[in-house]
Image: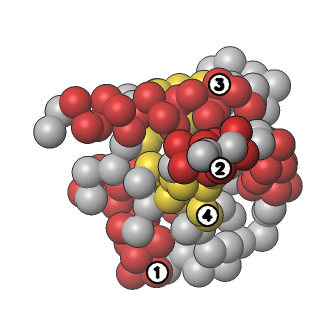
Amino acid sequence: MITGENMLEEESETYNIFISQLKDDAEEYDRFIEKLEASHEFQWKNHSTPNKTDKEQLKQQIKDADVVIILSGMYSKNKILIEQEIDLAQNLEKPIVIIRPYGMENVPGRIEDAASEVVGWNTSCIVDSVRESLEADDDMI
């Protein structure tokens, strides 16, 4: 017999996620990690490695991820790195979820155009957008 706890474990899927990052500014990244950790119904593995941001290292991190999450509030701090992450995700055909800048609605147009989904900082919306972006990706196959 399967107990409720075992049933939940069997039904849960682990999502492999890459989250944009900056070497010298982890505040937004850390806040986002806290949001994901707050969701007890969402199993995930972080494929981001802060401080490893050369092109080949990023490519490997993104290659192993199911979905790429771009924290758009970081865009103004390092446009080149964020655009490189987006380009790698697109080249590897990974869905991209854009998180709006914390406390704001506007997302820079260049990165919004690349998005499978654009959401704010609500944990359940983030989780839903990851799941939906992967379902949409499966539907295209």
Q: How crowded is mark 1: few (under 14 residues within 10 Å), some or many (20 or more)?
A: some
Say which residue label 2 marks: 6
The residues tagged by marks 4 and 3 sit, at their Cα atoms, a distance apart of 18 Å
| First along the sequence among labels 2 and 3 | 2
Residue at image location 51% in from the left, 37% down from the top = 130
**Circle 1: element type:** helix
| First along the sequence among labels 2 and 1 | 2
Say which residue label 1 marks: 57
Q: Residue 125 carries which label?
A: 3
Q: Does residue 56 lie above or below 119 as drawn?
A: below
| First along the sequence among labels 4 and 1 | 4
Q: How crowded is mark 3: few (under 14 residues within 10 Å), some or many (20 or more)?
A: few
Q: Does residue 63 lie above or below 20 as drawn?
A: below
Q: How crowded is mark 2: few (under 14 residues within 10 Å), some or many (20 or more)?
A: few
Which residue type does callout 4 highlight? Asn
The residues tagged by marks 2 and 3 sit, at their Cα atoms, a distance apart of 26 Å
The residues tagged by marks 2 and 4 sit, at their Cα atoms, a distance apart of 24 Å
Circle nearer the viewer, 4 or 1 = 4
Q: Do the residues labelled 4 and 3 touch (CB within 8 Å)?
A: no
**Circle 3: element type:** helix
